[in-house]
Image: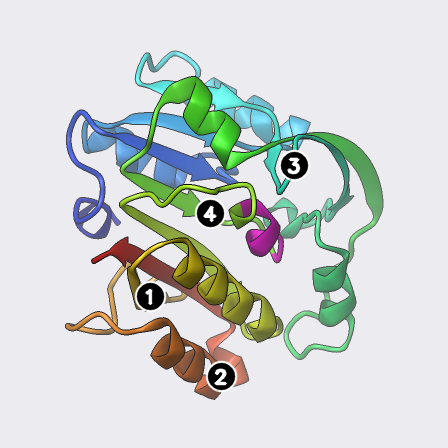
Amino acid sequence: MDLLNARFVPKDGLAFDIGAHVGDRTASFARLGARVVALEPQPRVFRALRLIHGRDPQVTLTCAAAGAAAGEMEMFVNSGNPTVSTISGDLVAAAKSAEGWDDQVWDRTMRVPVVTLDGLIAKHGQPGFIKIDVEGHELEALRGLNIPVAALSFEFTTIQRDIAAACLSYLNDLGRYEFNLSLGEDHDLRHATWISAADMKSEIAGLPAAANSGDIYAKLT
């Protein structure tokens, strides 16, 4: 993980961990010597995040989600597997008929505060890297970013390939980006040469359902 992140997060730089959960990426960014702004909207998970990273002066923690506009939104909570709790009702609907997701249950909802990436930049400075892992809410998180950043990643799933395609289109309009891919938790980029948004859309469309999920990386050319 550190070897991959070191390609994007310089020492003494700034990284955003959006959808931090208990902070494995936050820890990686901090090990690399970066300042970290970490967002996690689930109060119980946030308490664990604060216990682990709350005393680190490099890390700023915020109990909120990222979205297209600041305010509040409803979150669908998966008590048995909090890593797939989500603001995206579309993800919950898609999972109901998807192979490999049939044991996932979103058993309650709660209101959570929402901030924008633009707002975080105004408050903390421009990051060198943004990691976004928000369970089907990636496009709305990106819509809160209206200035290009040097590099970022966003999670995708094979049950919502349309969201990945829309994110690629949004970034393609935002700046001169090129793209790469890491599947699952490989922490390794698949392509020696970075590719276009159109080529990445084709690659995501052609992945088998068993690929399940991964992270698309974008960097300015």
Identity of the residue drawn at 51% across and 81% down:
210
Work out whether 168 lies above or below 131: below
The three-letter amino acid code for the residue at tag 4 is Ile
Crowd around label 1: few <14 · some 14–19 · many ≥20 (10 Å): some
Q: Earlier in the sequence, mark 3 or mark 1?
A: 3
Query: Label 1, on which residue?
Result: 182
From the viewer's perspective, is the residue at label 2 or at label 3 nearer?
A: 3
- Report how far apart the C-alphas of labels 2 and 1 lie in the structure: 15 Å
Task: Looking at the picture, tell me which residue is in the foreground, 143 or 160.
Answer: 143
From the viewer's perspective, is the residue at label 2 or at label 1 nearer?
A: 2
126 in the magenta segment: no
Crowd around label 2: few <14 · some 14–19 · many ≥20 (10 Å): some
Work out whether 172 lies above or below 165: above
Identity of the residue drawn at 35% across and 54% down:
175
Indicate the position of residue 65 as horizontal and vertical percent values.
Answer: 61, 35
- Please state, as top left, top right, bottom left or bottom right, where the C terminus lies in the image: bottom left
Disc 1, disc 4: CB below 8 Å?
Answer: no
Indicate the position of residue 91 as horizontal and vertical percent values.
Answer: 70, 62
Q: Is residue 92 left or right of residue 167?
A: right
Crowd around label 3: few <14 · some 14–19 · many ≥20 (10 Å): some
The three-letter amino acid code for the residue at tag 3 is Ala
Identity of the residue drawn at 22% across and 46% down:
8
The kind of secondary structure the magenta stretch mainly shows is: helix
The three-letter amino acid code for the residue at tag 1 is Ser
Query: Label 3, on which residue?
Result: 69
Query: Label 2, on which residue?
Result: 205
Q: Secondary structure at mark 1?
A: strand
Mark linked to residue 132: 4
Q: Secondary structure at mark 2?
A: helix
Question: Which residues lie in the magenta part?
Answer: 136-141
